[in-house]
């Protein structure tokens, strides 16, 4: 092989979007189906800039559900959390920390009385157009009272709440809750 013989081995093709782009020294695309300079648009960033904050918040539907409404004492509670972008374009919501959403049982975040150690730096929760994100958690009917101790809950009714981790989530409709009953 001499110098440039294997240069054409990697060539961008409209048939293969994962093939690397070959560029000339002027930055223009030189591959098959090239043209346009190889630039792409970050649609999530674009919609974030041009979509009003109120519309972004109304676009996201938050829901929490459990596998049952009534549980025997000590039976684990399966929690399903779903976030859904209702709009036909991407949405990004700024969050207060890298932990994009939180859940609580009767006001105890993640069923714990122990303070959370989450960085204070903001982040974002991004959704593709009409995207659904589903998460599952299991609550063993215990409240964490120290780093290494969990206390079982008594029989009664408990509220499970989920919200996006952003300021005024409740006022913006980015919260949902459900109630369960634990039988003694």
Image (cartoon, helix red, strand yellow):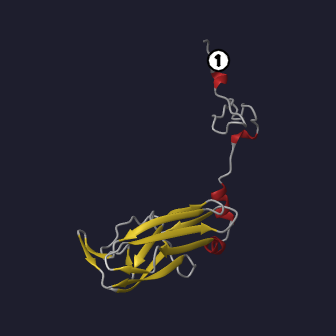
The spot of residue 171 in percent (x, y) is 55, 82
Q: Quadrant of residue 103?
A: bottom left
Q: State the residue in front, 140 or 97.
A: 140
Which residue appears farthest toward the left when viewing the image? 148
Left or right of residue 123: residue 183: left
- Secondary structure under tag 1 reads loop
Q: State the residue in front, 23 or 136.
A: 136
Can you see residue 57? yes
Query: Residue at point 38% right, 72% down?
Result: 110
Q: Is the C terminus in the top left, top right, bottom left or bottom right quadrant? A: bottom left
Left or right of residue 143: residue 88: right
Q: Which residue is denoted by mark 1 in the rendering?
A: 4
Left or right of residue 174: residue 12: right
The spot of residue 90 in percent (x, y) is 65, 61
Q: Is the N terminus in the top left, top right, bottom left or bottom right quadrant? A: top right
Q: Quadrant of residue 70?
A: bottom left
Q: Quadrant of residue 76?
A: bottom left
Count of picture labels: 1
Query: Residue at point 35% right, 79% down?
Result: 72
Q: State the residue in front, 151 or 30.
A: 151
The spot of residue 81 in percent (x, y) is 50, 70
Q: Residues within 10 Å of mark 1 (few under 14, many from 20)?
A: few
Which residue appears farthest toward the bottom when viewing the image? 156
Query: Residue at point 65% right, 63% down?
Result: 130
Q: Is residue 68 above or below residue 99?
A: below
Which residue appears farthest toward the top when viewing the image? 1
Q: State the residue in front, 52 or 153.
A: 153
Can you see residue 168? no
């Amino acid at each position: 092989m001499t110098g440039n013989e294997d240069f054409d081995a990697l060539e961008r093709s409209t048939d293969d979007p994962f093939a690397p782009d070959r560029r000339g020294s002027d930055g223009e695309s030189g591959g098959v189906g090239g043209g346009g300079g190889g630039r792409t648009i970050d649609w999530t960033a674009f919609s974030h800039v041009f979509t009003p904050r109120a519309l972004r918040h109304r676009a996201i539907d938050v829901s929490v559900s459990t596998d049952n409404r009534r549980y025997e004492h000590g039976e684990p509670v399966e929690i399903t959390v779903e976030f859904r972008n209702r709009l036909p374009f991407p949405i990004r919501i700024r969050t207060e920390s890298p932990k994009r959403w939180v859940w609580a049982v009767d006001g105890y975040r993640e069923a714990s009385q122990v303070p959370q150690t989450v960085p204070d730096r903001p982040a974002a929760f991004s959704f593709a157009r009409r995207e659904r994100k589903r998460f599952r958690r299991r609550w063993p009917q215990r409240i964490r009272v120290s780093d290494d101790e969990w206390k079982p809950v008594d029989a009664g009714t408990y509220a499970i709440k989920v919200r996006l981790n952003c300021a005024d989530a409740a006022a913006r409709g980015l919260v949902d809750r459900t109630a369960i009953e634990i039988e003694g």
